[in-house]
Amino acid sequence: MTPDDLLRKDSEWLRGTGPNADIVMSSRARLARNIDKIPFSNWANKVQLEDILVQVKEASDEIDFLKGSTFFRLKDLSEVDRLLLVERHLMSPEHAKDVEYKGLIVDPKEIVSIMVNEEDHLRIQVLQSGMNLVECWRIIDEIDTAFSKVLPYAFSAKWGYLTACPTNAGTGLRCSLMLHLPALVFSGQISKILQAISKLGLNIRGLYGEGTEATGNIFQVSNQSSMGMTEEDLNDNIDRVVNQTVSREDATRKSLLAKSREALVDRVSRAYGTLKSAHIISSTETVMLLSAIRLGVDLGIVKNMDRKMVNELFILTQPAHLQKIQGRVLTSNERDVKRADIIRERLK
C-alpha cells in the first residue's frame, strides 16, 4: 500500500456509523510503550533509533491482526505524503517532523496505526467510527499483548509503563472521542460545557489533537493522565462524561428544531448553497460550512446526502489530499480553487 492508495480507500472513522455517530464522529485508543534498556526517542542515538525501527517492524510481522499492514519509513515519503497521513488521523503532526529515524505501520483497513520513534518508541493507535471505545480497547489490548511477547517493555512495579511524558505513565493509555457539537455552539452553551469537561479531568483539543484549535464545531475529548487508574476506569470515566455531553447536544438539537426551525433551516441552506456554488473557498470556511451541512443531514433537513459523504469531504478538502488528487504541489490559491471544484462535483 502507498499513500496514493489511501485516496481510494474508506477510512474506518469516516464511515459515519456506530453508536451516537451523529454526534460522536470517532473513538480512538492509543497506547504509549517503550522498549526496555533503550533511551526514549528524544534521547536515543542514531544506532538505537534504527534498532527500534527494526525491532518493531520484525515484531509487527508476527502479529496476526497486523498481517497485510504497510510499514512506512517516513524519510522515504514526500512532505505531502506525510501530511496526508496526518490528515487521515493515522499519525500526529509531531510525528511528521524530523523524520530520519521514524516509521509508521498502517493496517489495510486504517483501523490500526503504529507510530515508531515519536515521543515514545511505540504509539499504538486504534480508530473506530462512532462511540465505540470498548471495541477500540479490545483491539488495542490484543495487539499490545502480542507485542509484549516479543518486545521487552520498559515497566516499573511502582510507576507502571514508563513513558517520555509523565502524564502518559501508568497504563500509557489515552482515550479520545471526536465530537461534533454544532447545536451547543449555535446556542451559546459550548463554553460552559467545555469548562465542565475540563474540571472533570479531561482535555479538549481540535480536529488534529494536541496543539490544534477546534474548528467546524469539532472537539476532541481525552483523558489528561493515565496513572493511578485501570484501563477500564479510564474508559468508563470518559464514556460517562461524553454521554452527558451527547445527551446535552441531542436535547439542544431537538430544541432548535422545535423553537427555531426556520433559522436552523436557513443556516443549513445558506451553507449548502455556498458550497454548491463557490469557485474559490478556504479550508477554514469549508470546515465551518460542512459542519452546518452535517447537522442538516443528521436532522433530516438535507435529503440528498449522507453522513459518510460529509465526513469524507472534511478530509478530501484538506491541503495534502487536494494535492494528491491533483498530482502536484499546489499554491494556496490553487488549493482553494481545487477544493471548490471537488465540493461542487460531489454535491451534484
Image (spheres, grey):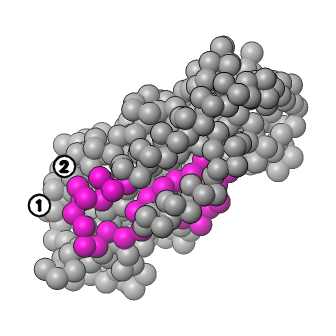
Residue sitting at x 44%, y 59%: 222
Residue 215 covered by magenta stretch: yes
Outermost residue toward the front in this view: 259
Rendered position, 341 above or below 24: above
Give neighbour class at mark 1: few <14, some 14-19, many 20+ (Cα, 10 Å): few
Spot occupied by residue 271 in the image (x, y as percentages of width and height): 79, 30
Q: Nearer the viewer, residue 234 or 333?
A: 234
Answer whether residue 249 is visible to the viewer in this image.
yes
Q: Pointer 1: what residue? A: 149
Q: CA distance from mark 1 to mark 2?
A: 11 Å
Marked residue nearer the N-terminal end (1 or 2): 2
In the rendered image, residue 210, in percent from the top left (x then y), is placed at 54, 64
Q: Which residues are magenta?
A: 209-238
Q: Is residue 220 above or below residue 172?
A: above
Which quadrant would the C terminus be assigned to in this image? top right
- Which residue, given by chain and number where applicable, does mark 2 sit on? 142
